[in-house]
Amino acid sequence: MRLANKTALVTGAASGMGAATARLFAREGAKVAVADMLEEDGRAVAAAITAAGGTAQFVKLDVAEEDQWEAAIAAVTGAWGGLDVLVNNAGISGSATNNLYDTALWDRIMAVNARGVFLGVKHAVAAMRLRGGGSIVNLSSISGNVGQERIHCAYNASKAAVRLLTKSVAVQEGPAKIRLNTVHPGLMPPMRTSGATADPVFRAKMLGHVPLARSGEVDEVAYAILFLASDESSYMTGSELHVDGGYLAS
Ligand code: NAD
């Protein structure tokens, strides 16, 4: 039980890597808040965790809305006495359009992927200070380190913002024993909002740049998040964990 007696909130936990992370956290002993905009799918993830003997609650949350963050954190601290772990995983893709200079899309991607993470960090830090510390894991991407074809530049910019926001707050909150790190997945199953990057021809081309020569699986990212969330990583803050089959090394 690597997260025994911990409480955790995972955003974007209705599907993909967020759902895998919520399920893994519960198996490792955490009480888990499954937070997402998608109510039906999010409730199903929480119900499956409970049916398997874990502890979970669904929390409706649009990460771009600050008042919803206040309510989400209050739901966790009210039910379980405090917050130990936040995983800022919710995100939208930058590959759903052919117009790579769409201004409205720039605003929406930055609102969810960058502002959403900032708001989560802001409100989790306040709760974790009351707890005497905590761990925040933010989902960046290989797209936060390098540029790519067919992806709106806001996606890369937002994931790079996550990377440096994480380091900045890690430096400032170290004395409060609040650790922040990023996880950078590589070629994974497509997101709900993926467009061009879900195309098999594009994916085959991307695979040519992956030394391990395959896509990743959601649990392979969830285990990296688990390590950074747990006390096993107690001397790590401000760091980047690449879960990308070697993409950024090549
Ligand atoms: P996904 O589309 O399967 O899941 C994303 C979840 O976030 C969904 O459940 C969605 O409803 C939720 N969400 C979107 N906007 C939201 C909002 N405003 N408020 C609350 N929830 C919201 O995607 P995924 O592949 O599981 O991606 C998870 C994270 O990993 C994202 O941050 C993504 O950018 C990042 N990532 C994905 C890949 C990939 O190839 N799939 C690669 C690198 C990084």
Image (cartoon, rainbow, N blue to C red):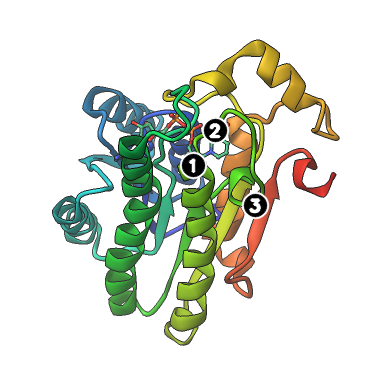
Per the model, the C-alpha gap separating discs 1 and 3 is 11 Å
Q: In this rendered view, identify the residue nearer to me: 173 or 247.
A: 247
Question: Can the viewer see residue 227 in this picture?
Answer: yes
Mark 1 vs 3, N-terminal side: 3
Q: Quadrant of residue 73?
A: bottom left
Residues at marks 3 and 2 touching, judged by CB atoms closer than 8 Å: no
Q: Is residue 108 above or below residue 157?
A: above
Q: Residue at x 60, y 14 (%)?
A: 199
Q: Residue furthest top?
A: 200
**Where ligand 1 lies, by quadrant?**
top left
Give the secondary structure at mark 2: loop
Task: Residue 162: give x, y in percent of width and height.
Answer: 48, 57
- What's the residue type where badge 1 is placed? Tyr
- What's the residue type where badge 2 is placed? Ile
Reading the image, the residue beneath label 1 is 155
Reading the image, the residue beneath label 2 is 151
Question: Can the viewer see residue 24 in this picture?
Answer: no
